[in-house]
Structure formats: C-alpha cells, structure tokens
Image (cartoon, rainbow, N blue to C red):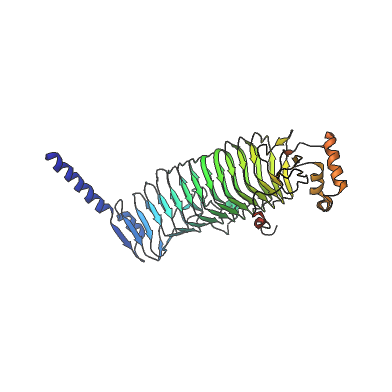
C-alpha cells in the first residue's frame, strides 16, 4: 500500500511538472522579447505576434519560439541575432535578420552552439545575416523549410555561408531554399546526415563538403552557382537523384573520394559536368550528363570505379581524360554516347565496336566543330581506322567496350539549353 501511494505521488509530481513546462506565453509588439525569453521557464512556448522586435536573444533553456503571422527578430547588425546553447530548442515561423558582419566571430542569424542537440529550425526566413545558420557540435538537428539569403551586396569572400555544419552527427537539412551567400551549404567533419529537397543557387558553391562520412545527398537542385556540389576528402557517400545544372564551372565535383554511390543524377549545362579527381571504388551509374562543355573531366589516377548505364549526350567534349593508360567504363552493361558512330549489326542495341572518348577524330571535332558535317563520310571513317591501326597516333582514353545505341533516359532533351546566364 505504501509503495502504491509513493508511486501515485511520484506520478502527480511528474504531471504537475509537465503542466508547468507546457505554459504558453504571448509576446506582442512593444514587448521586450529578450526579457520574455529570460522570464520563461524550461519547456515554455513563446508565441510571438506579428511585428518587429529588435533583440539579440540568448536561449539557454529548452524553449519553443513560435512566430504568429511571421514576426521579425532583428539583431540590429551586431552579433548573433539568436544564440542557442542548450538542447531541445524549437524556432519556427520567424523572420530572423540583421546579424553582425564579423567573419572572425562568425556572426549568424541563428548560432547553434556546442551542446544545442536536437534543435529544430523550421519555416523561418533567415535574411541579411552574415551566416544564416552556424551549427557547431550540435547533434540530431532538424533544419527544414527555411528560406535563407545572405548580404547579397557583399563580395562573395566577405559573405558567410547559408548553413554551416561543423563537427556534427545526425543532421537533417530538408527542403530549404538558400541563395546569395558564399556557399549555400558548408559541411565539415559532419557525419550520418541527410540533405534532401534543398534548392541551392546564386552562390559560390551550392555545397562545399569536406571530411564528412556516411551522408546521403538526395533530390536536391543546385544551379546558377560557380560550382554545384563539391565533395572533397570524403568517403561513404550516397549522392542520388539530384540535379546540378547551369553552374559556371562544375556540376558535381568528386575529389579524393572513395567507397561511394553516385547515381541517378542529372548534370546539365555546366562548364564541366563531373569533375573527377583522385577517385576510387565508387559506383557512377545511371546519371544523365547532357549539354555540358565537358561532360566529365577525369584525372589524377581515378580508377577502379564502376561506371554503368550513364547517358553522355551532346556534351561538346564527352570526356577530358588525363592518364597514362586506358580507363575502361561500361564492362557490365555499357553507357550511351551520343557521338558514337559505330554500328549494331545484330540489333541488340549494343555497338559492335568499342567507344573511345579521345580518339583522333574526337580531338579534331573539338578543335573544328564543322567536321561534324562529315562524320559519316568515308574520309572520316578512314581517319578513325588509321588512328586505330597506328597506336603512335593514339592517346590513352576512356574506353567503353559495349556502348548502348540508345539513351537510357528518354526525357533527356528537356535538359538542353540550361546554361549559366550569359554563357
């Protein structure tokens, strides 16, 4: 009986504590928002009415800040507009603006400090901040459905990044629209993260991604940047079903990458579609590489990779290869090359002669595009045959032993003409 009474008393204490923690506080225009945050108890919800509040907030207890009709919290162009130092904080529905502009102090619209685990930032506009979100040593954060823009009149080196992740685990960065910053997403020493459904544009890099492992990059659009997605010094990545188009340099950069899957992506209208440097043991499959100046720039011993089922269509130069020996792609089921001029006598949709990306005829075509008019002529065919018979005229190449006669992607033509503005 005594044990039962003790158990009931404990339950009542927990219920009372829960009731206290669930208090909702209303903040209206003219109220001191910083003072309201200081007065709030752990677990409280602050509902902030539409209006403009100038404050540099320190959130050092678990709270929910919920904007009603999108109020603005302005940092007055100094420091961090909102600084979070504890776990389990939720910030939603706010316009967060006007951080300071000190790169040394990493001023941010929202700065999640070490230990701010499980923070949630959703449906916010982070505008005119140096860094939109700086997330440091905070695990299992959720950043979703936010619009993030930087101090767009600043030169690129003087801007901060849209979202900066440093030394984190388990982050989910979902369905954000990020632009006019230095790098839309900067990811360093951050593992087991999910990046999905984001639109990253009008920045230096859509994503600058280093020293990070076991991450999934899926269904993102990166466009009108200098570089789209840059994966550097990483391994164990999955990069699936993304679209990198209209970037002035590369669509997807893979540099010093191992043990990863890159599949189902569209890489279109970039100066270089894929830039692949020092890459081994990856699967590069089922991608559409179309209408780039260079489809793939391949160098620095990038070998022992599986490259199957890709379409290389209407790239001015399909592959720019720098290597000492041939690199074989398509050993299992081949790739499609729009400039392949071989034949298929038995009708199995596989070319009867291997495709070579950098033979003599290809090099002449890149230098003199008008030669394309003569591709089917006996003279050009004879030149290709001569190059094959006299290896002294041949340079190492990417070789596909079973090129597909038809594209794998039937809708490829919709990705033509998506170039960087002015190019």
344 displayed left or right of 249:
right
Residue furthest to the right in view is 379
Quadrant hosting residue 309: top right
Residue 344, horizontal then vertical, whole percent: 75, 44
Does residue 142 show up?
yes
The residue positioned 32% from the left and 62% from the top of the image is 26
Q: Name the image quarter holding the N terminus.
A: top left
Residue furthest to the front in view is 346
The residue positioned 15% from the left and 41% from the top of the image is 4
The count of marks equals: 0
The residue positioned 24% from the left and 49% from the top of the image is 17
Give whichever of 256, 164 is nearer the camera.
Answer: 256
Give whichever of 392, 182 is nearer the camera.
Answer: 392
180 displayed left or right of 334:
left
Residue 150, horizontal then vertical, whole percent: 53, 56
Residue 264, horizontal then vertical, whole percent: 59, 47
Quadrant hosting residue 415: bottom right
Quadrant hosting residue 284: top right
70 displayed left or right of 410:
left
Residue 177, horizontal then vertical, whole percent: 52, 56
Q: Name the image quarter holding the C terminus.
A: bottom right
The residue positioned 70% from the left and 49% from the top of the image is 406
30 displayed left or right of 221:
left
Does residue 204 show up?
no
């Amino acid at each position: 009986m005594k044990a039962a009474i003790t158990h009931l008393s404990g339950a009542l204490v927990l219920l009372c504590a829960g009731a206290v923690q669930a208090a909702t506080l209303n903040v209206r225009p003219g109220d001191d928002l910083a003072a309201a945050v200081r007065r709030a108890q752990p677990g409280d919800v602050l509902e902030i009415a539409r209006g403009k509040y100038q404050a540099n907030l320190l959130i050092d207890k678990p709270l929910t800040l919920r904007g009603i009709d999108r109020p603005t919290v302005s940092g007055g162009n100094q420091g961090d507009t909102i600084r979070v130092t504890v776990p389990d904080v939720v910030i939603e529905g706010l316009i967060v603006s006007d951080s300071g502009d000190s790169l040394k102090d990493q001023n941010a619209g929202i700065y999640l400090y070490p230990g701010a685990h499980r923070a949630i930032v959703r449906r916010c506009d982070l505008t005119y901040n140096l860094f939109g979100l700086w997330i440091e040593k905070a695990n299992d954060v959720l950043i979703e459905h936010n619009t993030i823009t930087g101090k767009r009149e600043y030169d690129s080196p003087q801007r901060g990044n849209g979202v900066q992740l440093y030394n984190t685990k388990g982050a989910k960065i979902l369905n954000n629209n990020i632009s006019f910053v230095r790098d839309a997403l900067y990811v360093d020493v951050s593992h087991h993260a999910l990046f999905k459904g984001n639109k990253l544009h009008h920045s230096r890099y859509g994503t600058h991604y280093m020293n990070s492992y076991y991450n999934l990059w899926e269904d993102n659009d990166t466009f009108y940047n200098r570089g789209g997605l840059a994966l550097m010094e990483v391994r164990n990545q999955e990069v699936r079903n993304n679209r990198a188009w209209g970037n002035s340099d590369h669509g997807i950069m893979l540099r010093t990458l191992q043990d990863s899957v890159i599949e189902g992506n569209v890489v279109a209208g970039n100066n270089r579609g894929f830039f692949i440097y020092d890459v081994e043991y990856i699967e590069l499959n089922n991608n559409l590489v179309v209408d780039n100046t260079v489809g793939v720039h391949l160098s620095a011993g990038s070998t022992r990779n599986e490259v199957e089922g890709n379409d290389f269509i209407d790239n001015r130069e399909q592959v720019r290869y720098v290597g000492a020996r041939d690199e074989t792609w398509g050993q299992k089921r081949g790739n499609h090359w729009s400039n392949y001029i071989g034949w298929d006598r038995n009708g199995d949709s596989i070319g009867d002669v291997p495709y070579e990306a950098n033979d003599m005829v290809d090099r002449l075509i890149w230098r003199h595009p008008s030669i394309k008019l003569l591709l089917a002529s006996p003279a050009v065919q004879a030149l290709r045959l001569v190059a094959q018979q006299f290896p002294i005229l041949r340079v190492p190449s990417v070789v596909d032993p079973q090129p597909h006669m038809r594209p794998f992607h039937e809708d490829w033509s919709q990705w033509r003409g998506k170039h960087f503005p002015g190019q």
